[in-house]
Image (tube, rainbow, N blue to C red):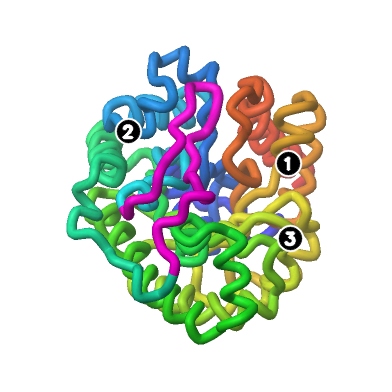
Amino acid sequence: MDTQTRPVGTMNSRQRVLAALRREPVDRTPVCNPTSVATVELMDLVDAPFPDANRVPELMARLAATGHTELGFDSIMPVFSIIQESSALGCKIQWEQKDNWPTVKMREPIFQDVQDIRIPPDLLTHQDTRCVLEAIKILRKEFGNEVAIIGKTMGPWSLGYHCFGVEPFLLLSLDNPGKTKACLEKLKAVTVEFGLAQIEAGVDALTLPDHATGDLVSGEYYARYLRDLHIEFAQRLPVPLILHIRGKTEDRMEYIAQTGMSAFHYDSKNDPQESMRIMRNRTSLVGNINNPETLFSKGPEEVRKEVYQNLNAGVQLIGPECAIPLQTALENLKEIPNAVRDWHKERAAKN
């Protein structure tokens, strides 16, 4: 039996998640959603549809809770989208309907240069950031210390995409590293302020998405622009941080392991065994069940296979690789905790 899952007595969901984020022994591997597991079916079940569930605290909390009450996950994540801070900064948002995600209108950037960056005084009282803070308070009151509540604060690279546009920001990073770093230095205040506010509201951990994705940004770029900032976030935000970056990211996992982040939420494009080898128990891994092919397009048997692959590799927390497609079947999501429990039963029977 591996050291991460040796007998330690029965844990509740919150204890299980926090122990795994610290790479301490757990009674079983936790099922964790650092990003969204909301679906249209769950929206209908609790009458909390998009876009309102992104803007009304009571609806946000009600929909988020289904990740635990209906799906059986050990964590609750109330921040379904990546637009809350950007909306508060002044970005234009396409709110869509319940079957689609709200998105930033990145073809209408609000900043052109570093001197344009302004953090508005109502950053934490704007409707879309206040919604998150109030939803966290509701969830903490409802669930107490039984379930891990995970917040989300966007990293400055992601905010750069939203505020400058993806292509202009990437071109800036190529042409003017100094100015790019100056932009990140200014935008990091949003990451820290919103993160601290969520900690005060009651989160146990924070997901920190910083979309230096594998198909757009190299590992060397991560080291140049983001490693030191992520070290700073790990020092300034006094809860476990779960870094989230999409794509094939094995080329930067060594750098990520140096940041002090508690966990890395990693993509299905990365091999679990190789990812665990690189991390060497310095940073927990969370993931990496494939979204578009497995959870959305296949069935429980294929979901179970991917869960077992991660467990066999020693991955500390199991869950989808990113925010799931909104039309994902609930039976596939429920199969994740079912498979985790069965794997542990099979291991116990062999020992």
Is residue 242 visible to us here? no
Q: Return the residue at label 3.
A: 215
* Observer-nearest of 241 and 174: 174
* Distance in Å between CA atoms under marks 2 and 1: 28 Å
Q: Return the residue at label 2.
A: 55
* Observer-nearest of 37 and 283: 37
- Say above or below: 319 vs 249: above
| Residue 142, image x, y percentages | 27, 31
- Say above or below: 212 vs 109: below
Q: Quadrant of residue 32?
A: top right
Residue 99 within the magenta-colored segment of the rendering: yes
For residue 187, the mark is: none
* Distance in Å between CA atoms under marks 1 and 3: 17 Å
Q: Which region shows up in magenta?
A: 89-112
| Residue 165, image x, y percentages | 53, 58
The answer to which of marks 2 and 1 sits earlier in the sequence is 2
For residue 290, the mark is: 1
Residue 206 is left or right of residue 100, and the answer is left
Residue 342 is left or right of residue 102, and the answer is right
**Amino acid carrying mark 3 in the image:** Asp
Q: Residues within 10 Å of mark 2 (few under 14, many from 20)?
A: some
